[in-house]
Image (cartoon, coloured by chain):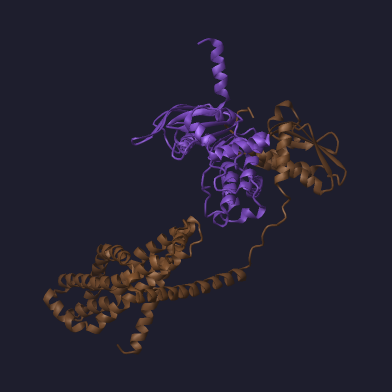
Chain colours: A purple, B brown
Amino acid sequence: MSAAADTAVNSEADDAVIDIRGLNTSFGDAVVHRDVNLTVRRGEIFALVGGSGCGKSTMLREIIMLQQPVSGSIRVFSSEVVGLSDEQALPFRRRWGVMFERGALFSSLTVTENVAMVIREHTDLDPSLADEMAALRIALTGLPADAGRKYPSELSGGMRKRAALARALALDPELLLLDEPTAGLDPLSAVGIDELVRNLRDALGLTIMMVTHDLDLLWRVADRVAVLGEGRILGVGTMQELSRSEDATIREYFHGPRGRGAMEQAWNRK
Amino acid sequence: MACDRTDRYPARYAVSQSDIAIRMLNAPITSRSTASPDIRPGATPRELRCTGEWLLRSAAQIDVRIDACLSVMPLPTGGEMLIDAQAVTALDTSGAWLLHRTRRDLELGGCTVSFTGLRPEFEALLRLIATRTTPATHGPQSEPGALNRIGGKAWESLLGAFGLLSFLGASAIALMRELVQPRRIRWKSILYNLQTAGVAALPITGLLAFLLGIVIAYQGAEQLSRVGANIYIADLVGLSMVRELSPLITAIIIAGRSGSAYAAQIATMKVTEEVDALRTIGIAPIDLLVLPKVIALVIALPLLTVYTDIMGILGGMVMARAQLDVGYATFIDRLDEAVSLTSFLIGIGKAPVFAVIIALVGCYQGFQVSGSAESVGQQTTKSVVQAIFLVILADALFSIAFSWLNI
């Protein structure tokens, strides 16, 4: 390999926030990922799509070290995360925010306490400033101010989702990992989340990786999309590129009745 | 954002924040100090200069600096105010919030505030913060006074008692409905509950009753042998076990074992909306979740009580032979005279009442869950404490009633 090519590879690696190489995952006999390679670059909104049960959420869980792959390497912020102990994982966990599909808010804490707890655990802010920061996160996600005093069980599904996003933003993360950010939201709220995600990326230079089924969201905010199926990556690219793909599964995904509707809307907006 | 942020959250500052604030206020501005965030009066009284990285990790420090800065300079009221943010090298939402809050505080003093030198991306972030946050309209909520709290608690207890009574009523009505249409009785569920609350409880209730019998006989043996009334050990163990202790100890064990399980099961089902699902399918939760438990326990608890009677007396017999030389045959002969059928029936007769209390309190507390994981635990605890309390209360009422009736 020539020196020039070597530098090019290196600079690409520096640019990668998440870099997955040769990832293999299986549960018993069921193979979920077969030699998967994937790169998420700094500052982009990257979406992972695919049919139910194709291993999208599993991959997300492997990135955030909740699950171990069988083999392969996952590099986050240019460091290997596979096989780290909880103690070694801590610096990583402080630099990313994770939003779970069903929110996973602590049910015995109010929304403000949910967010402030994360801030208090990892910084030395005094309680009133931590509460102020929590209120800011809650306001940023578009929740009304009085939602902070409520318990998760008193919130609607959409509000719970926003509260979960507020908690993911608690530490001003560099990397945001979202599992189905708009699932279960009414279209108006979903658009709000779209805008918020884009605003955050633009203003903070965040890198966002999300798992989603929401075709509108893909057309609106995703810079690049990877389609996962049959245990491997079927295609990676912008929505325009993928919509021209010849692969049968990708075509089915983007040109099905719902896919077409979302695409037409996206074109009409332009 | 290319700066290295691996050590974004340093360990707690060794020096107190006010120390840092004072030191920094006196420190000259040098090019080296730009990394740590700072805000200080500028060249003119109408100017503030912000420098450094305004990030969450140093938010506490920035907060102190802002307070210090705004307190040392004579705040202009009205007029223009300029915040020079050219030297701000990094900004996240926390830093942007502190900038925004400073501007807002100045504007509340009647100034018009403008920023200069802010990088475009920081400006976008500041705009985002400004549009998403509205000035706080509510002050801190006032804490209720002691009297208020006592009243609230009392009212809550009263409501709880009413709730339990109306739950009893609802269950009774549901039971009537099932008795009128016997094919609606869920036999399978009743049998399952008999198995888990009755058969599975045999080892622990038996062991405890046996030990209790030993303890009573052991305590009594010394007193009785002193007056040479050894044979009355059968009266002591037999009467106390059959009439009082055996129904009570069985009920207490079952309250801890099954009452808590009922509460936890129903509470979890309520949190996961399974109870609502039952209702929408057209199954009354009381029919499926409560009645089989009540019926099964009303059958199981008297049977368990008979069993613990036997085990307790066995324990007493073993001890009587070991300590007082009262043989098994003599003991049983005496037992026949000492314990009347009435005493036995009184003991057994309390058991169904205890069973209703345990099952209803467990189920009722389960339904009272508020939706959080913590509340499931609270309701389970409450179900056990309340069931045991009510069982002992009922036992005391029985004693009073029986003594009035001279039984």
| Residue at (85, 39) in percent of width and height | B46
The image shows a total of numbered marks equal to 0
Q: In which quarter of the image is residue B240?
A: bottom left
Task: List the single residue furthest toward the front.
Answer: A257
Q: Is residue B252 left or right of residue A100?
A: left
| Residue at (31, 75) in percent of width and height | B351
User: Depth check: A110 or A215 in front?
Assistant: A215
| Residue at (55, 70) in percent of width and height | B153
User: How far across and how far down the image is residue B250, in percent?
Assistant: 30, 70
Q: Quadrant of residue B201?
A: bottom left
One can see residue B218 in this view: no
Q: Is residue A223 above or below residue B63?
A: above
> Which quadrant of the figure contains the C terminus of chain A?
top right
User: How far across and how far down the image is residue A238, in percent?
Assistant: 58, 29
Task: List the single residue furthest toward the right.
Answer: B79
Q: In this view, does B396 lie above or below A130?
A: below
Q: Is residue B90 left or right of residue B277?
A: right
User: Depth check: A125 or B133 in front?
Assistant: B133
Q: Is residue A145 above or below residue A83?
A: below
Q: In this view, does A25 lie to the left or right of A100?
A: left
Q: In this view, does B201 lie to the left or right of A257?
A: left
User: Depth check: B73 or A6 in front?
Assistant: A6
User: How far across and how far down the image is residue B3, in percent?
Assistant: 63, 28
User: How far across and how far down the image is residue B163, in percent?
Assistant: 49, 72
One can see residue A117 in this view: yes
